[in-house]
Amino acid sequence: MPSVLASFYAQWRVRCGVVPVLRDDQDSPPERLLQTIWQHQRLLREQLKTLDGTPARILHPGFRSVEGGPDFRGAVVQLGDGSAQTGDIEVDLRSSGWHAHGHDRNPAFQNVILHVVWESEKPASEALPTLPLRAVLDAPLGELSLWLGGESAQTLPEELRGDCCAPLRTLPAAQLLDLLHQSAHVRMQSKAAQFQARARRVGWEQALWEGLCRALGFKHNIWPMQRLAELRPRWQTPRTQPLAVQARLFGISGLLPLELTRSETGADNYVRRVWDQWWRERDEFSDCLLPRALWRLHGSRPANHPQRRIALASQWSMDGDLAQKLERWCARDVPDSALADSLLEDLQVAPDDFWSWHCTFRSPRLKKAQPLLGSTRVTDLAVNVVLPWLWIRAVEGKNAAMQTTLERRYFAWPPAEDNAVLRLARQRLLGGTSPRALPGAAAQQGLIQMVRDFCDHSNAICDRCKLPDLVRDWLQRDR
Ligand code: SF4
């Protein structure tokens, strides 16, 4: 094997600290490197044994999780003569990390089927199979750290790509885009059908509100935001002052702080003003208060904190014209290049004395005021709510011209911000192409739909997935 430090570029990596230089006899790898070793399975795979001596076969190492909780999700593991099990993998340097990091008390770790450690003498618990890696690396640690140190564990090794990756990669770009757009159209129609069904029960405007609030909840707070929207007929009354609406929403949500910060005067003054409103009304809403525990408050960017999203919803609710504004936006002639900006302009709200400067009740004042609605969020609102809602209304109204306009806008919409689902889907299905391979929001939506339709009904080893054959057949028919 050539020396790993033979080239000047190789030396740069070491000198700049891009990769750690580890000695086999003395060092433990950093946890991130251990995760990368696991992800790439740089192991003597036929020699793996848990601490109690049970042979372990790793049918799939799982997918790196970036959302907290266990390090790898959806792994497929066979222990001894047992049948293959699917579950999560947690990687720690030592088994003591299980208790030290509080995994034993965290419900997110309930589905861990294997604790992977660098070295340990006994497992964190008898019920938790534990696999030490120190003695089963496929190369010396020093060498692995040089080769893998620069790799992100989030990059999927070639052999872990999905079975559909090979046929999908043979599709010409235009045909792949056609496939993604067809899948995206299904996704849009399904969202539209949901609005239609809901509108039959609560009316179009309320259905829109529920969609907007759900979208403001991102994926972790969809349900409490949905509930707040369902309660809208209770909290939105005519001529209510903006602060009173905010107070109701924060009070009902359970997110109004019970104590002052005593360090941020501006924030404390605002909390006092909100409480001045809320304590008078609290009894009236006592039957619909949400428990604070319903909210997931960590793991998202500060600007996306539910408190700030509720402030935005309260501002929207003061604008009695929101649904009509969207209809006017739909009727307006908007060039493709200005779609996102024009919708942002219509959905943007006036600056708020407190929330333009704060992400949460307790966060320090920002140096610069931030709008309550940013340009990245507007694309999510467009593809998940605004366009499907307007489209199904056009369908119901038999307005074919408007339907065509909306479809054109949907397929011309610029891409949304990249996210973990898209990154993994690009790697598994498309072989790690760059985000540019998905030129618009519709292509992204199409890829997500394929994940929901196929990956979510299969497993990490693509068991019984029909997509590869469907793509191959489609390719052959077209030739
Ligand atoms: S489960 Fe199906 S769609 Fe998902 S990566 Fe595997 S083959 Fe592709």
Image: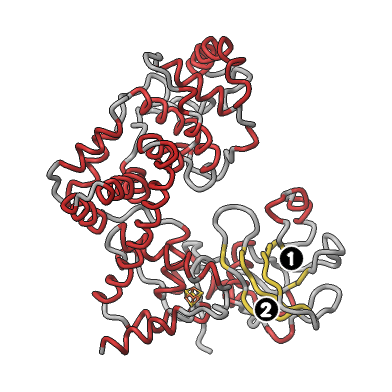
Which amino acid type is shown beneath numbered disc 1? His
Q: Residue at x 78, y 68 (%)?
A: 130
The residue singled out by tag 2 in the image is 58
Comparing 438 with 4, the one in front is 438
Q: Which residue is drawn at 67% across and 70% down?
A: 86
- Count residues near mark 1 (Cα–Cα under 10 Å), then give few for <14, some for 14-19, many for 20+: many
Q: In this view, does 372 lie above or below 189?
A: above
Q: Residue 426's image quarter?
A: bottom left
Q: Which residue is drawn at 62% across and 38% down?
A: 294
Q: Which callout, 2 or 1, points at the residue further toward the start of the chain?
A: 2
Q: Residue at x 80, y 83 (%)?
A: 81
The residue singled out by tag 1 in the image is 115
Which image quadrant: the C terminus? bottom left
- Count residues near mark 2 (Cα–Cα under 10 Å), then give few for <14, some for 14-19, many for 20+: some
Q: Is residue 366 above or below residue 120?
A: above
Comparing 326 with 193, the one in front is 193
